[in-house]
Image (tube, coloured by chain):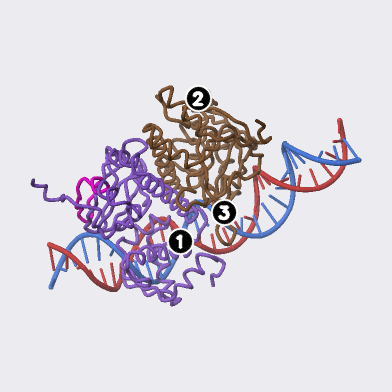
Chain colours: A purple, B brown, C blue, D red
DNA sequence: CGCAGCATTGAGTTAGGTCAAAAGGAGTGG
DNA sequence: CCACTCCTTTTGACCTAACTCAATGCTGCG
């Protein structure tokens, strides 16, 4: 059978990201059934949307490669980035409650996602307890993450926000086998600013400040963290400003 | 059998809040099984905590009466209110992912909650599809709500934040049979400020401004909304500031 | 090579924060 | 019932972190 050019059949059982998006400790037969969860893969070009606000919800998406942002938009056109997602992370959870998505998911670089029809997920989690619990954990994790962002937006200063952002990114990248100290930002200053509740100029200035203080080396989107302890100190103790 | 003074056995099947916390359209037998979900009720005195950060997660809680706030705390002691919850709403979802709670839930007035052990919820949702989907929807709703708060914290001005807050509260109260235009705030200005990412003085000043503009009547915690359209206009079109 | 989008930096403004004082209520005990 | 205390709220004066506007500089892509 032929598949459309932008989709391809695929299996979780031999996917190297499995331990990121799927539960561990499944039996052989459970693992086989999980393979059926992923209907197809879908490629999303840089700048293209995976789904958008108002669109009918059908599936969750596991990111295989690439980098996304999700954002919500107000009536008057302002938008707020609500998250940046990378390989192994699941997006689309916002769509469950109203059967329609309430945010946009946009690829920040060419990406590929595994499309998992939600009715199949529900079907299978009724039979595989480990999957059921895993789905609950993924949703709970997202709630806890957003709690953290609320704390950041509601009570941190610009430097703290950017420091927390960098530490979070580098920690997630490290979990995927990348460097602990070096990263390439996939998003613009404006997108970082939107996520952190700051204007792009403030993001840029704060980067410059980190450079001056010898905490980071920043060349456009290439960031090298020279003093991670200093970054952590900024997040934990805002009063250590000079 | 005797029960402890602060707990009492109870049934969902004849609870008037059922349509708020439970799925609708259950069969008689499903309904009976749902009754078993609620282990006990628990009373929480004003100012007492239902659960707190670090505590082992065992159950979700459906609020029967009373009013709660949830808040996260930073290492250096600042805290951020992440939500206010009222009758019919479910709290405790944050605890699923790490088996421990990551926030505090504190009663803002004497309250009573239905304790639903999570392992029973999972057990039963494997058998009752409607319950399974309902749990998914509750978690998704919380994710969407938090998206909205991120938008508020990340890109709204003080007046917009307070207007959105009041409209949201009054809408939820109205869904519970209370007035569309009058409400009694269960929380202090400081708690409102924490939720909205503002200082208590700013909250107070913004209330005063609404009063001056004839939008609200505010006497301490008693608020009467005189011009809901004006409030909506503030939220949707921030540029209508004078 | 040149253009368009992104990033940096400077100068001036402002929304909201900080600090301080005073006043209004709610609860308690005499 | 009143007096007292404690907590919350309001309001004023001043300050500052971040925003706005504007100019300039990169850089990667066609």
Using the numbered discs, state the Cα–Cα distance from disc 3 to disc 2 in whole angstroms: 38 Å
- Lateral position of residue B123 relative to residue C19, left or right: left
Label disc, if present, on residue B13 of the rendered structure: 2
Which dot, 1 or 3, sits closer to the camera? 3
Pointers 1 and 3 in contact (C-beta within 8 Å): no
Q: Mark 2 lies on which chain?
A: B
B150 and A77: which is toward the camera: B150
Using the numbered discs, state the Cα–Cα distance from disc 2 to disc 1 in whole angstroms: 47 Å
Query: Residue B227: percent from the left, percent from the top?
Result: 50, 30
Q: Residue, x 42% and y 38% (percent of image)?
A: B135
Q: Which chain carries label 1?
A: A
Q: Residue, x 34% and y 65% (percent of image)?
A: A173
Q: Name the residue under label 3.
A: B79
Query: Residue A191: percent from the left, percent from the top?
Result: 34, 57
Element carrying mark 1:
helix
Which residues make up the magenta segment? A34-49
Q: Does the magenta stretch include residue B239?
A: no
Q: In which quarter of the image is residue A217?
A: bottom left
Query: Residue A237: percent from the left, percent from the top?
Result: 55, 66
Query: Residue A176: percent from the left, percent from the top?
Result: 33, 64
Using the numbered discs, state the Cα–Cα distance from disc 1 to disc 3 in whole angstroms: 15 Å
Label disc, if present, on residue A161 of the rendered structure: 1
A86 and A71: which is toward the camera: A86
Q: Compared with residue B233, is residue A206 higher up or lower down, i.e. above or below?
A: below
Which dot, 2 or 1, sits closer to the camera? 2
C24 and A107: which is toward the camera: A107
Q: Mark 3 lies on which chain?
A: B
Element carrying mark 3:
strand
Q: Can residue B242 be seen in this view?
A: no
Q: Compared with residue A28, is residue B126 higher up or lower down, i.e. above or below?
A: above
């Amino acid at each position: 059978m032929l598949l459309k050019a932008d989709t391809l059949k695929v299996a979780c059982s031999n996917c190297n990201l499995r331990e990121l998006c799927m539960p561990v400790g499944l039996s052989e037969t459970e693992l086989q059934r999980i393979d059926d969860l992923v209907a197809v893969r879908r490629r999303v070009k840089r700048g293209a949307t995976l789904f958008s606000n108002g669109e009918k919800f059908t599936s969750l998406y596991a990111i295989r490669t690439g980098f996304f942002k999700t954002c919500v938009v107000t009536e008057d056109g302002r938008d707020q980035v609500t998250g940046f997602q990378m390989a192994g992370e699941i997006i689309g959870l916002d769509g469950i409650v109203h059967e329609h998505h309430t945010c946009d998911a946009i690829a920040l670089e060419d990406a590929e996602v595994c499309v998992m029809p939600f009715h199949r997920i529900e079907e299978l989690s009724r039979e595989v307890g480990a999957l059921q619990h895993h789905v609950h954990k993924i949703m709970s994790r997202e709630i806890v993450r957003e709690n953290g962002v609320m704390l950041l937006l509601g009570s941190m200063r610009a430097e703290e926000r950017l420091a927390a952002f960098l530490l979070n990114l580098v920690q997630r990248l490290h979990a995927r086998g990348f460097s602990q100290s070096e990263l390439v930002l996939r998003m613009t200053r404006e997108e970082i600013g939107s996520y952190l509740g700051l204007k792009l100029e403030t993001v840029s200035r704060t980067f410059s400040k980190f450079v001056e203080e010898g905490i980071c080396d920043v060349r456009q989107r290439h960031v090298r963290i020279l003093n991670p302890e200093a970054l952590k100190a900024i997040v934990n103790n805002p009063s250590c400003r000079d």
